[in-house]
Image: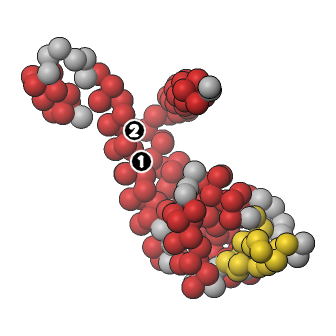
Amino acid sequence: MDAIFRQWQAERPDIDPAPVRIYGLIAQIQMQSTGFIDEVLAPLGLVRGTFDVLTALRRAGEPYRLSPKQLATGLLLSGAGLTSRLNRLEAQGLIARLPEPRDRRTLRIQLTAAGEAVINEAIPRVFEVQWRHLAPLGEDGRRRLEEELARFADAIAQIMEQQEAP
């Protein structure tokens, strides 16, 4: 990030490139965390994206069932992005697409028994590796980081809401 920052300073000294560091670090952390999470999930036949779908269903509580729209909204995905994940999970036998009893035009996505077993095994593995990577921050550093990231996320959400308002 420092090299990119310096390059922008040299090429466009009229613009303050400070946000490049923050957004770049956020992107770097996202890429790194996806990598180490994928590594932990590989023996279970999962990747971060499919893990996220399974955890959303698991967190929903019994009977571990949600509509595709609920899943897409909760995971911040487009319909197409969700469909590819659902296809993969269905092929693995970890989810089932069930017709909605009151409206056969709509579906519900439900964990299968195999899906529940896999996600129950995956969750502690992912949490353990996340804790291991957070450990160098210590409890106080982790708490401060969480507070600042939450404050930043809230600020961005407010700006976006203002832009959407007529």
Residue 98, percent across and down? 77, 79
- Horizontal and vertical percent position of residue 17: 25, 23
Q: Quadrant of residue 24?
A: top left
- Residue 136 visible in the picture: yes
Residue drawn where x is 54% and y is 26% of the image: 163
Tell me what residue is drawn at x 51 percent, y 51 percent: 130
* 96 lies above or below 21: below
**70 lies left or right of 48:** right
Q: Secondary structure under badge 2?
A: helix
**Between 74 and 141, which is closer to the camera in this rendering?**
74
Q: Residue 140: x, y in percent?
A: 54, 27
Q: Residue furthest front?
A: 166
The residue sitting at 20% across, 28% down in the picture is 5
Percent coordinates x, y for residue 136 in the rendering: 43, 38
Three-letter amino acid code of the residue under disc 1: Gln
Q: Relative to 8, is 124 above or below?
A: below
- The answer to whether residue 115 is left or right of residue 32 is right
Q: Which mark is residue 26?
A: 2
Residue occupying the point 41% across, 47% down: 30
Q: Secondary structure at mark 1?
A: helix
Kindly identify the amino acid type of the residue bearing the numbered disc 2: Ile
| Residue 143 in view, yes or no | no
- Which colour style is shown? secondary structure
Q: Are marks 1 and 2 in contact (CB under 8 Å)?
A: yes
Spot the residue most to the top: 14
Q: Quadrant of the C terminus?
A: top right
For residue 55, side relative to residue 43 (left or right): right
Image quadrant occupied by the N terminus: top left
Per the rendering, the mark at residue 30 is 1
